Each structure stands twice: as C-alpha cells, then as structure tokens.
Image (tube, rainbow, N blue to C red):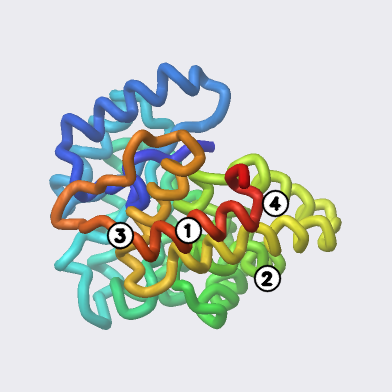
Amino acid sequence: GIVMNVDASEVIALDDDEQLRIIRVCRAVVDGRVPLFSGVVAGSTRAAASKAARLRDAGAQGLTVFPPFPTFSGAPVPSEMIVRFHRAIAQAADLPMVCFQFPKGWGPDYTPEILRAMAEIPQLVAIKEASFDVGQTLQTIEVARGLKHPIGVLTGSDTFIFEAMLMGCHGALIGFAGTATRELVAMHHAVHVGELAAARAIWDQLGPIARYCWRLPIRDFRPRMKEVLRLQGLFPSAACREPQLGIEADERRAIAQLCRAQGLIAH
C-alpha cells in the first residue's frame, strides 16, 4: 500500500486543503492498484475525527493516526485518553486504522494494557512500531500475537528494518520506502519465504543510507531523504517548508557518496 500525509512527507507543514488534494491526486494515480492510506494529524479529538471523515471522502481507504501533540506529550498518558481518541476517529471514518507508536521519549508509550484496550476497536488493524527501540519492538510483537483480535505490527524504525522483520514485524510503514522501493519489497518477500541471505544482502546495500538519513538530529531525515530523491532525479529540489531547515554541503556530499557506493545513483 501507499501512505500519504505522514511525517516523511512533511504533513505538519501542509494545511488541510493540501492534505485532501494530495489524497485526491494519489487516488487518481494509484487507481485502485494498491490500498491508499492517509495520516491523520490534529490537535484535538473533534478535529481528528472531522479530518478523518474528510480524508475518507477524498479517497483514503485507511488511516494512520498520529498522537495529538502536545496533549499526548509526557508520561504517563491515561489509557482512557488514548483509547477514546482512537475510537472517535474510527467511528467517524469507519476505515481500517493504524495507530502510531512514536520514538521513546517523544510521545505516549502504547503499553501492553493500552494495546489490548485499543485492539477492541474493530477498525484497528495494525500498529506502526516506530519506537526505534529493540526491546519495545519485541514487546509489541509479543503483545500483538496474544491479542484476542490480532493486529499487524509494522516497523517504523527505519534504522533496523531488516532486523525488525526478523523479530516478527509483518511489514514496514517507513519514510525510507520513498527510495529503493523495489529493493525493500524484495527484502520483505525474501524474509517472508525464508531466503534470509538474499534479504541480508539487500539490507547490507540499503542500511547504511537509512542509518545516515535517520541519524541525529532525527528531524533532518526529511531534507536528507529529499536529497536522496533529488539525486535520483525524482525531486527537483530538496527544500523543505520552514521552520525545517535544509542540510549543509558536507551532508549533501556524504549522501551522494553513500548513494553511489550503495548503487542508488550512477557513479
């Protein structure tokens, strides 16, 4: 599937009309060949539910629900607050829904108890596990397996995609899939059929680029990834909307060197 209006595509810098237009355009291009999901980013339950319904009407076939910041900042976040937020969105749009575990320390920790409660929402089909933490990823996988109504676990940790699949993640929902998409799909298939040496070879090629783009400060993965896409001729520019800044010349040179060395652009 394809997911639009998410962090890698600078959703927070887009107004509502732009987000709806993106879904309409993408729906026309995709033309039903794969499922089309949209991120839902809003600061309140009412706003999120309203936006989810409008995204559905624009053509979204599923939703990836971002925690509402700053309300969900700081631990612990009451489980009732988290469950009620997701349930309201589910009831408003009635689409397959993915909840979003942010990196540790950034947002709410979807504990086993919270996941079990959210799994009672019929529309919840998966969690994007983007904690960037091995222990948390393993815990989420174990909890998901034991649910009465199992949900998928999609890694959102771009720095260890292959390893997360070996741990038991069913797939990935990642910004890094904007590049080397064919190779990442092949890696996922290889893991699924047990061809681990082939999968490992693909990740040995791609991993260094992913780890560079998602190094600290992690917010700069956006202009770094845009630079990769610019080098590949897919984007005319690596510019981001302010307040996000671009990257310096030394980073651009390092990205170009990595992309050449790993075969993403010609020498």
Which corner quadrant of the image does residue 58 belong to? Answer: top left
Q: Is residue 134 visible?
A: yes
1 displayed left or right of 162: left
Q: What is the three-letter code of the residue carrying label 2?
A: Met
Kindly check if marks 1 and 3 are in contact, taking CB atoms under 8 A apart as contact. yes
Q: Which residue is mark 3?
A: 247
Say whether disc 4 or disc 2 marks the residue closer to the N-terminus: 2
Q: Which residue is mark 4?
A: 188
Kindly check if marks 1 and 2 are in contact, taking CB atoms under 8 A apart as contact. no
Q: What is the three-letter code of the residue carrying label 1?
A: Ile
Say whether disc 1 or disc 2 marks the residue closer to the N-terminus: 2
Say whether disc 2 or disc 3 marks the residue closer to the N-terminus: 2
Q: Which dot, 2 or 3, sits closer to the camera? A: 3
> For the residues marked 3 and 4, what is the alpha-carbon distance in whole angstroms?
31 Å
Q: What is the three-letter code of the residue carrying label 4?
A: His
Query: With respect to residue 78, does 123 lie above or below?
Result: above
> For the residues marked 4 and 2, what is the alpha-carbon distance in whole angstroms?
13 Å
Q: Quadrant of the N terminus?
A: top right
